[in-house]
Amino acid sequence: MKVTDHIKKANGKTLFSFEVIPPQKGKNIQDLYNNIDPLMEFNPPFIDVTTSREEYVYVDKGNGLLDKRITRMRPGTVGICASIMHKYQVDAIPHLLCGGFTKEETEYVLVDCHYLGLDNVVALRGDARKDESYFKATQGGNAFASDLVQQISDLNKGKYLHDDIIVEHNYDFCVGVAGYPEKHMESPSLNTDLKRLKQKVDAGADYVVTQMFFDNNKYFEFVKKAREIGITVPIIPGIKPLAVKRHLQVLPQVFKIDLPEDLIDAVEGCKDNKAVRQVGIEFAIQQSKELKEAGVPFLHYYSMGKSDNIQAIASKLF
Ligand code: FAD
């Protein structure tokens, strides 16, 4: 079922959802199930599964020399979605990236999603590769998420990349895209970034999921500004419970987001990471309560491979 239909069906009630990352290459999917299992009691209508970009790794050739190889450390997103859907009877949503994929490869992935009965996809550009200082579009790939949304919209109309004729089809993907309450790190301003978001919606995006934020006012202001420029689709807040002391540096550095002073003070006052995890849980409960009272359609949690903290948060809200 489409995310937008889940929202309509909920009739104003806030729903619970979360994001998982595929297990590392070579690991078993059971690790992932162990993290999903405790969250199922909160009835998530959907679970997102991330996609990782290709990376360069150095492989020892055995003669003292290192060989530079390209690989993907966490493959299998679409297969994992299919298995989640069948195991838990919920919608599973693959993240699709521009970076690292040609348009042909993306088309094959979309055809697979359709065969497997996945009704939703999240369309993203992806970040720069770790060995590159800025995002470079893959040759033959989409350059921006809006281009990827356009490719999916075209397929929804039965238009394949290299066929001029419209063939009989029933593609009807519901498309999610990313939004940034504190603007995307590369964007010169929040207003410019919002115009880019509008382009994604105009290209066919059905809903927005936000980057993590820790100050609800930034989300409320973002939604207000989005509505002012004619973005009418649902905007789902993304919540990341802070979990270790190092997050004080890592989250602002990687995601270019601000952390509130009271949260920083509370974390700095913790004697170990167990205490930090508890502070993160309590902060996220308060944050989620306020968002729920404001009537957000979903509270969407970033699990980053561990779910005990999200279980503790959800148990106070759902
Ligand atoms: P875009 O919407 O294409 O925007 C990228 C930048 O380009 C922005 O600064 C925008 O303002 C600008 N821009 C857009 N269009 C134009 C244009 N026409 N001309 C000039 N500038 C333009 N990453 C992963 O690798 N895997 C994942 O699974 C993943 N999941 C995510 C889920 C969510 C909810 C979020 C918020 C992010 C996720 N990311 C993921 C990270 C995401 O890939 C990065 O934030 C990436 O840098 C931008 O992706 P985007 O889809 O927002 O890009």
Image (cartoon, helix red, strand yellow):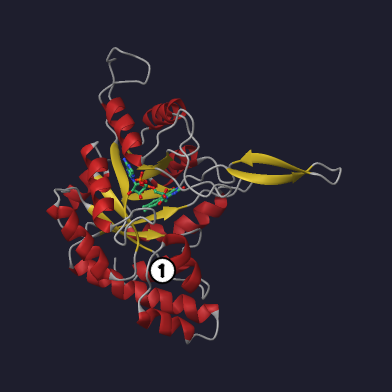
Whether residue 69 is visible, yes or no, is yes
Q: Which of these two is toward me, 173 or 163?
A: 163
Q: Residue 170's spot in the image, x, y percent? A: 27, 24
* Residue furthest out toward the top: 165
Q: Residues within 10 Å of mark 1 (few under 14, many from 20)?
A: many
Residue 48 lies, with reference to residue 141, above or below; the image says below
Q: Position of residue 71 (x, y in %)?
A: 62, 40
Is the shortest distance between ligand 1 and the CB of mark 1 under 8 Å? no
Left or right: 256 in relation to 174: right
Count of marks, rendered view? 1
Type of amino acid under label 1: Pro
Q: Quadrant of residue 93?
A: top left
- Residue in view at x 30 percent, y 44 percent: 176
In this view, the residue farthest toward the front is 188
**Percent x, y of residue 171:** 29, 27
Q: Image height check: is 112 above or below 48?
A: above
Q: Helix, strand, or loop for circle 1? A: loop
Residue at 63% from the left image edge and 44% from the top image edge: 56
Report which residue position mark 1 lands on: 241
